[in-house]
Amino acid sequence: MKRNVVVGVTGGIAAYKTCELVSRLVKAGYGVKVVMTEHAKEFVSPLTFETLSKNAVIGDMFAPKPHFDVEHVSLAKWAGVYVIAPATANVIAKVAGGVADDMLTTSFLATEAVRIVCPAMNTVMYKDEATKNNLAALKERGIRIIEPGTGRLACGDVGVGRMEEPEEIFEQIDRILTPNPDYRGKRVLVTAGGTSEDIDGVRFIGNRSSGKMGAAVAEAVLARGGEVTFVYGNISVPVPNGVKAIPVLSTQDMYDVVLKEMEDCDVIVKCAAPADYRVKEKFSSKIKSETLTLELVKNPDIAKAVGERKGKRILVAFAAETDDLIKNAAKKLASKNADLIVANDVTEKGAGFNSDTNIATLLYADGRMESLPIMAKTELADTILDAIQSL
Ligand code: PMT
C-alpha cells in the first residue's frame, strides 16, 4: 500500500479542521498532497495547506506545469488513500453522479486508492433525501463514509452535520495504511548499497550492491509504523520516501555517520556492502601509467564498532559469503557482537547482489538458526523484522 494520502478540501467551514488532519498525517510520516476546490480557498488559504503538507496545493486543471504529466491521473495513482474532508452536499452529489468537472472530482474518480468521504453540512441538508441517496450510492461503490457528528453547527443550528474530528479521521486512515504498527515508536538505522573508495581523480573501488535489500528493510519498517534513518552509498533504487536519508561515499564516511546516528536509534540493520579496503595513497589527478600497483589498507569495521557500543540496541548484520556460509556467518555473529546475522551465499542464483530475491539463513546470538527459502527481498525484509521482534 502506498503511504501517500491525497486530501481533497471543498468549500465548508470545517476546512479549518482539515489543517489539523494534514498536520497529523505529515507528522506520522505519510506523504500528503492537498487538492482544493475554488470555494475551499475562500475558507482556508492554500498557503496554509502548502506549509503543512510541504507540497504545492493542487487546484487548477490547466495551470502551466514545470513537467508534463496528466496531473489528475498521476495524483490519482500516487494516492494510497484519497479522503475528501470536508465533503459538501454539492461534492457528494457530484461524486455520486460521476461528475468530473474540476481537479478534485476528476482525480477522485480516477483513483484506485481507498476512497473516504467526510460529510460536513447543515443538518437539514444532511437529512435531505437527495444527500441520503447520494451517500448510499457512494457506499455501494465501496467509498467509505466517515459519518458526521452531532453538535452546534457553524450556522447556529444544533444537530447532525459536523465533520468528524481530525483525530478520528486520522486514526481511520492510519489503520488502513499501517495495519500492523508493531514498529511504532522504534527508530531503525538501515545501511544500504556499496561504499566507494577513490583511487584517483576519476576511478574508485566499489561493488555491485544495488541497495535493494536495504531499501526493502527501510520500506518494511515504515509500513510497520517505525522511523528510519537510511545511510546509503551507491544505490540503483530510489531512496524510500519518508526516511531520514544520509548519503555517504566511503566506508570511513559510513562509519562516522553510523556511529553518530546510532545514538538515536533502537535497532541497526547493516545491509550495506562497505568496501573493506581503501588505497593507502589517493592520486588527485587521473593516473596514466602503463602498469599500476596499488597498496590497499583495511577500512574500519562499522558493524564491529556498533557491536562494541550498542548497549541495549539490537544489531543485525549481514554476511555475504562465497563458501562455508554457516561457519563464516557464525564467526561474524560473534566477532561483531551482533544479535542476528542474515547470511547469504552471494554465488547462489537468486541471492545476493542486485537480485530482487534472496536466499538467507538467520543465525541468532541465542543459538537459533533458520534457513529460509528463496523469497523476494521485500518478503525477507518483513521476515527479518519479525525475527528482531522475537529477540
Ligand atoms: O544491495 P543489494 O544489491 O540488494 O545486495 C544485498 C547484499 C548482498 C549487499 C546484502 O544481502 C548483504 O549481504 N550485505 C552485506 C555485504 C557485506 O559487506 O558483507 P560482509 O560479510 O563483508 O560484512 C558483514 C557485515 O559487516 C555486513 O553487515 C556489513 O554491512 C558489515 N561491514 C562490512 C565491512 C565493513 N568495513 N564494515 C561493516 O560494517
Image: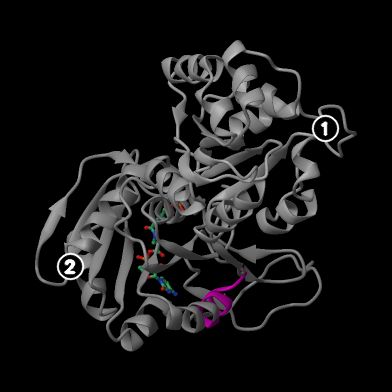
Q: Quadrant of the N terminus?
A: top left
Tag nearer the camera, 1 or 2: 1
Which secondary structure, mark 1? loop
| Main secondary structure type of the part rendered in magenta | helix
Q: Quadrant of ligand 1?
A: bottom left
Question: Residue 121: where, in percent of width, then height?
Answer: 59, 34
Q: Nearer the viewer, residue 93 or 352?
A: 93
Residue furthest top as drawn? 97
Task: Identify the residue under disc 2.
Answer: 391
Q: Is residue 272 visible?
A: no
Closer to us: 69 or 322: 69
User: Label 1 neighbourhood size at 10 Å, few (<14), some (14-19), many (20+)?
Assistant: some
Please indicate whether residue 369 sits to the left or right of residue 20 in the image: left
Q: Which residue is mark 1?
A: 60
Task: Give the amino acid at mark 2.
Answer: Leu
* Type of amino acid under label 1: Asp
Instruction: Please indicate whether residue 96 sits to the left or right of residue 167 in the image.
Output: right
Distance from label 1 to label 2 (Cα)? 52 Å
Nearest to the observer: residue 376 or residue 119: 119
The image position of residue 196, as x and y in percent, is 59, 66
Picture colour scheme: one colour
| Residue 249 locus on image (x, y percent) | 62, 69
Which residue is at a point 62% across and 73% down the rendered structure image? Answer: 293
Q: Is residue 152 magenta?
A: no
> Does any portion of residue 182 appear in the rendered image?
yes
Q: Secondary structure at mark 2?
A: loop
> Residue 252 in magenta?
yes
- Residue density around tag 2, few if under 14, some if 14–19, many if 20 or more, within 10 Å: few
Above-or-below relation of 128 to 180: above
Q: Quadrant of residue 332?
A: bottom left
Kindly identify the residue that appears in the image at 60 percent across and 51 percent down: 17
The region drawn magenta spans: 249-256
